[in-house]
Image (cartoon, grey):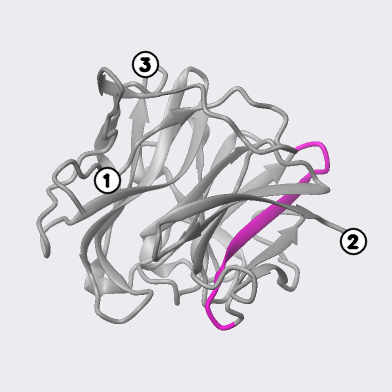
């Protein structure tokens, strides 16, 4: 709430042993001991109040972030309006980032898919899971060849049981029905299994689902952590070094804007 507001920062960690927490080695800095804002924003309400990364992945030597450009926060809890969802990239190890002017999904009438997105590379494609703005929508799915990530015209969308570019991102049909907020998806190559976590506002909990393919069928949801344990939870983002049985995820809470590294043992 002060004058040194940075919408987002980036830390590095080489800590592979998550059983005792996670330590950070360094951060992207713009001056000595000052963490840099990696994706800028106008910080003007009803124009662009903030820009928030939602997932990250790498293809070769290039790193990517999905992000949402938020126009304004609504007075109704759990809702906001975005300008668009988009993709940014870095070619210098994360030190500087470019918001690609073409790789974005405009928010048409405030109800469009892929405003809050999670992207996962697998089997030669990048799979893009997305919801509308707010924490109340359903999850849609797109895919693109990994060498064409920044080309919106190259994306196919899962629509009524088939991959098609017809209708574009506004016509994609749900692979998981909402309410779903703060989506996180990972692919476990060792187990050949997909995992999805999100805030289910109806369950008042972070839940997990699993599937054999990105389009599903996705399993019924299982509670990971609920408001009875962390009253003000809203985000549950999976750590990429999780395993098929040990799921580590970062839990966000809203009033103090704190985060917790949690571990769940998955029993099937």
Q: Which residue carries the number 1 mark?
A: 7
* Mark seen at residue 121: none
Q: Which circle, 2 or 1, is nearer the viewer?
A: 1
Element type at mark 1: loop
* Mark seen at residue 92: 3
**CA distance for labels 2 and 1:** 39 Å
Q: Is residue 242 visible?
A: yes
Left or right, 24 with respect to 135, comes to right
Q: What residue lies at 57% left-to-right and 38% top-to-bottom?
A: 125
Q: What residue lies at 37% left-to-right and 71% top-to-bottom?
A: 134
Q: Which residues are magenta?
A: 189-202
Q: Counting other residues with Cα less than 10 Å from the Cα at mark 1, is it few (<14), some (14-19), or many (20 or more)? A: some
Q: Quarter holding the N terminus?
A: bottom left
Left or right, 267 with respect to 94, comes to right
In this rendering, the answer to whether 17 lies above or below 48 is above
**CA distance for labels 1 and 3:** 21 Å
Q: Which residue carries the number 2 mark?
A: 268
Residue 76 lies, in percent from the top left, at 30, 82
**CA distance for labels 2 and 3:** 41 Å
Residue 100 lies, in percent from the top left, at 26, 36
Please tell me in which quadrant of the rendered image residue 236 appears.
Answer: bottom right
Left or right, 88 with respect to 57, comes to left
């Amino acid at each position: 709430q002060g004058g040194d507001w940075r919408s987002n920062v980036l830390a590095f960690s080489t800590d592979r042993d998550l059983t005792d927490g996670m330590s950070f080695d360094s951060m992207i800095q713009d001056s000595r001991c000052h963490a840099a804002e990696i994706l800028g924003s106008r910080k003007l309400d009803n124009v662009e109040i903030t820009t928030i990364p939602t997932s990250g992945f790498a293809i070769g030597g290039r790193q990517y972030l999905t992000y949402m450009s938020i126009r304004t926060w609504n007075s109704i809890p759990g809702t906001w309006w975005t300008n668009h969802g988009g993709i940014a990239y870095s070619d210098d190890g994360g030190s500087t980032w470019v918001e690609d002017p073409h790789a974005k999904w405009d928010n048409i009438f405030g109800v469009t898919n892929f405003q809050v997105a999670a992207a996962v590379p697998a089997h030669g494609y990048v799979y893009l899971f997305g919801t509308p703005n707010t924490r109340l929508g359903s999850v849609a799915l797109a895919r693109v060849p990994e060498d064409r990530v920044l080309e919106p015209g190259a994306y196919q969308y899962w629509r009524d049981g088939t991959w098609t570019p017809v209708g574009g991102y506004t016509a994609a049909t749900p692979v998981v029905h909402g309410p779903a907020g703060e989506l996180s998806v990972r692919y476990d190559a060792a187990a050949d299994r997909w995992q999805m976590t999100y805030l289910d506002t109806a369950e008042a909990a972070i839940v997990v689902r699993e599937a054999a393919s990105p389009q599903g069928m996705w399993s019924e949801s299982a509670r990971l952590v609920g408001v009875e344990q962390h009253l003000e939870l809203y985000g549950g983002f999976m750590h990429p070094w999780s395993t098929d049985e040990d799921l580590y995820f970062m839990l966000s809470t809203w009033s103090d804007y704190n985060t917790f590294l949690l571990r769940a043992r998955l029993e099937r």
